[in-house]
Image (cartoon, grey):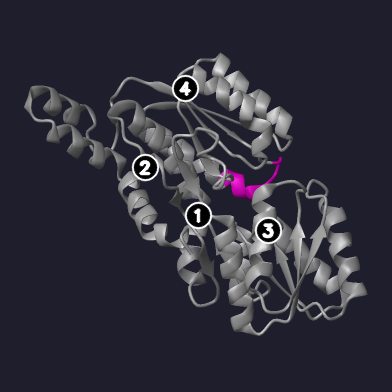
Amino acid sequence: MERTSNRPRAVAVAAACAAGLLLVSGCASAHGGKKGQERAAALAAGHANTPRIKIAMVTHSAPGDTFWDLVRKDAQAAAAKDNVDLVYSSDPNAANQANLVQNAIDQKVDGIAVTLAKPDAMKGVLATAEKGGIPVVGINSGVDAWKSEGLLEFFGQDEGIAGEAFGNKLNALGYKHDICVIHEQGNVGLEQRCAGIKKTFKGRTDLLYVNGADMPSVKSTVTAKLQQDHSVDLVATLGAPFALTAVQSVSDAGSKAKVATFDLNKDLVTAVRKGTIAFAVDQQPYLQGYLAVDGLWLYKYNGNSSGGGSEPVLTGPAFVDKSNVDRIAEFAAKGTR
């Protein structure tokens, strides 16, 4: 319960950070005098003319995962606004991801945004960044680990809270038996989502592990499970591409189960509109990418720390279903949701 009480504060901070240029201009003016006025002028609303800096964003994205396209797209939008040279790289293998962070350190970047899907694998390289004086922020994965790893800020969703909200949604809709499909074994965020569902869902939850890097295998594994157990009435997936594949599995298995998911993409929004997907949990990946870059820029040029350096900036969860999907579709058509 203590975690949820931080949400209003975190959301307020996110709103302030999203208006970064205006915020910093105000802070600079508050210092008074010619120096403060010069800084305010340098950070004119709309585009920064501060000296160019380099920021690296290193995620655990697998090739072809459309979720990360949104994270990267908005990170690029913030970089363009803040006069930042953004270097993006990713690898789902934790050791390889750590090597990419080390590469960023070797390039002497001015800041790093990183995901902590497997935080233990990142400890050593994050300590190296800290020794080198490079500020690091967390995005998307690692809400329970970012402070212990010494990160400056965190922008993302509390996956446990999101899972609990998902379970409550299933209760409200009358479901009795779900399978929670985990597409990357060892990813703490995915495990937390399913654990959250089990915590609040009054029905039965079974875990189903699949190889997310092999979509035909995902389809056949989910199909087999549905053929074996006809009591399953809800397939919960943890990413939009897997939800769309699960819809095919339901059809192939001759099952009456519905599909609901975490995360969105353009095709998923269309599926919600058509009713082939019951609902989705949106953690607003576009916002995560934007705030990470903007947060590092704010820290570099004004010493700001979103959340005061002690609280995460939560970007979700928010539900998307038929009641509000038309509004979301407007932005999905633009490639930002």
In whole angstroms, how far apart are the C-alphas of marks 2 and 3?
A: 27 Å
What is the three-letter code of the residue carrying label 4?
A: Ile
In the image: residue 37, left or right of residue 108: left
The residue that appears at 72% across and 28% down in the rendered structure is: 96
Residues at marks 4 and 2 touching, judged by CB atoms closer than 8 Å: no
Q: Which residue is mark 2?
A: 306
In the image: residue 54, left or right of residue 223: left
Q: Which residues are magenta?
A: 62-69
115 magenta-colored: no
Q: Which residue is mark 1?
A: 284
- Where 203 sits versus 65, above or below? below
Instruction: Give the mark, 1 or 2, whose residue is nearer the N terminus.
Output: 1
Residues at marks 4 and 1 touching, judged by CB atoms closer than 8 Å: no
Q: Which residue is mark 4?
A: 134
Picture coordinates of residue 271, whole percent (x, y): 64, 69
Q: Which residue is mark 3?
A: 238
Instruction: Give the mark, 2 or 3, whose residue is nearer the N terminus.
Output: 3
In whole angstroms, how far apart are the C-alphas of marks 3 and 1?
A: 14 Å
Q: Secondary structure at mark 4?
A: loop
Estimate how packed mark 2 is, as few (under 14), some (14 to 19) or many (20 or more) residues with alpha carbons within 10 Å: many
In whole angstroms, how far apart are the C-alphas of marks 4 and 2?
A: 17 Å
Instruction: Give the mark, 4 or 2, whose residue is nearer the N terminus.
Output: 4
The residue that appears at 50% across and 32% down in the rendered structure is: 150
Estimate how packed mark 3 is, as few (under 14), some (14 to 19) or many (20 or more) residues with alpha carbons within 10 Å: many
